[in-house]
Amino acid sequence: MTSPDELLRAVEEASSAGAEYAEARYHRVEGLTMLFLNGVLVGATQPLSEGVAVRVLYRGSMGFAATSDLSREGLREVVQRALAAARSSLSQLKKPISVGQAFLGSARYSVVERRPLADVSLEDKVKDLGERLKGVELRREGMKVNNHALTYSERAEHKIVVTNDGAMVESKIPRVSLFYNITASAEGKRANRWNQLGAVGGFEAVDALNFQEEFSGDLDSLYVNLVKASSPPRGVMDVVLGPEIVGLAMHEAVGHPSEADRVMGREAAQAGLSYRRELRVDKIGSELVSVYDDPTIPGSYGFYLYDDEGVAARKRALIYKGVLAEMLHNRETAAAYGTESNASARAIDYRSEPIVRMANTYMAPGDHSFEEIVESVREGVYIKKYMEWNIDDYRWGARYVGLEAYLIRGGRLAEPVRDVVLEINTRDFFSSVAAVGKDLTFSAGTCGKGEPPQPLPVTMGGPHVLLRGVRVK
């Protein structure tokens, strides 16, 4: 590996060559991925990446380079390549780039592993996960499970970030994830359900993911959809959304359009733009709606205390009482907007440049119980889980299709209905919020962004929410 002193030497060399800003990041990721198909292990890989990334700002032009050569000569060479990349862009530079001030860290931290991932053998991990799969009862009367797949992933990440203006942060964060997909059929109908569970920690974190309970619960949801449910209602009515759907909406309809680089138009070619670029007013919804992104939540899949520019992480308010608030910033976008970075710069590995990313995005809880929310609905539908979703390039028009859903009559849950479709734009979604539950629940995910792609761990969350008078199909 590389020491902080060697990285400091690299940024000092860049500064001596004329860089206004210099950043060096040692980044090692040691992983394991195992795939089980219908309970049988069919493959395993143990990827490892290790190297150093250097970014420099030279006369308003940014340059980036990376290397797996950790020798002193290798670090000198990568600094020179980063400087050369910045110089080569000077003739094309329309507006100089700036890197803003930020609350930088000088710190070392790590997530404690009670059962270190490196100490549990591959054989023991295979045995453990195989037994968990065998412990799930697949049979449901009248329903056939056609296939089920489980992917176990672990990612032990070690970073050292040093900048020429004072950051020096070392971190070690291990993560584990279980991703599964189930396809089932009954009476000529088919449905599928996928889900991801994730947390930081050692192999003990697998226990906290409650895999068997989650997997069995999703089998029950498929059974309700395929065997028990009838055709969905249509028209304007009250809709109660489960925390899983609320969390997904916070990620897609609030988190992504709040990324400052996307608002500036830099994601247009890959992932689209943002309604925050187009709106002329800040008010977007009910005063009951507040949405935050907080990397510092202990145990969360998107956890970190400092970002990949060495900036101290904190809770960010994206919507506060129905009004658009902060955007997610790195040091470059913060300078462009005349503010400070709120620690949103993340990179997947040493080969990748840090870009603006979410961490743990959620709607703040309210003060209603689930029972109180349902009791307030005369006629409507409760959508507990989703089967599929879509959202447009501006993160404005969205479509959520329910997997498990129930009619509500006279303030009580009634018979199940299948494939309920909620199509709604973002402002109507938030303006329709009439009650927010106090049962905040989180779920893990892998967020895609960037070119080349940088899939990163995140968490999405929310409580039960009542939308008053919206259209379902």
Image (cartoon, grey):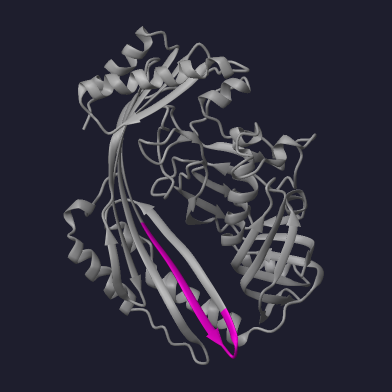
Where does residue 413 sit, x and y in percent of width and height?
67, 77
What is the magenta segment's predominant secondary structure?
Answer: strand
Picture residue at 44% right of the left edge, 33% below the top? 353
- Residue 378, by quadrant, is bottom right
The answer to whether residue 314 is visible is: no
Picture residue at 29% right of the left edge, 66% below the top? 43
Vertical arrangement, residue 437 with respect to residue 51, above or below: below
Instruction: Name the one closer to the observer, 15 or 232.
Output: 15
- Residue 112, by quadrant, is top left
Vertical arrangement, residue 77 with respect to residue 394, above or below: above
Where does residue 284 sit, x and y in percent of width and height?
75, 43
- In this image, 50 relative to 446: left or right? left
Picture residue at 43% right of the left edge, 29% below the top? 312
Number of marks:
0
Picture residue at 66% right of the left edge, 78% below the top? 418
| On-image quarter of the C terminus | bottom right
The answer to whether residue 207 is visible is: yes
Vertical arrangement, residue 381 with respect to residue 122, above or below: below
Where does residue 45 sit, x and y in percent of width and height?
28, 58
Where does residue 375 sit, x and y in percent of width and height?
71, 70
The part of the chain drawn in magenta is: 177-190
Magenta includes 188?
Answer: yes
Vertical arrangement, residue 423 with respect to residue 18, above or below: below
- In this image, 182 relative to 42: left or right? right
Magenta includes 396?
Answer: no
Instruction: Name the one closer to the observer, 168 or 352.
Output: 352
Instruction: Name the one closer to the observer, 408 or 19.
Output: 19
| On-image quarter of the N terminus | top left
- In this image, 390 relative to 79: left or right? right
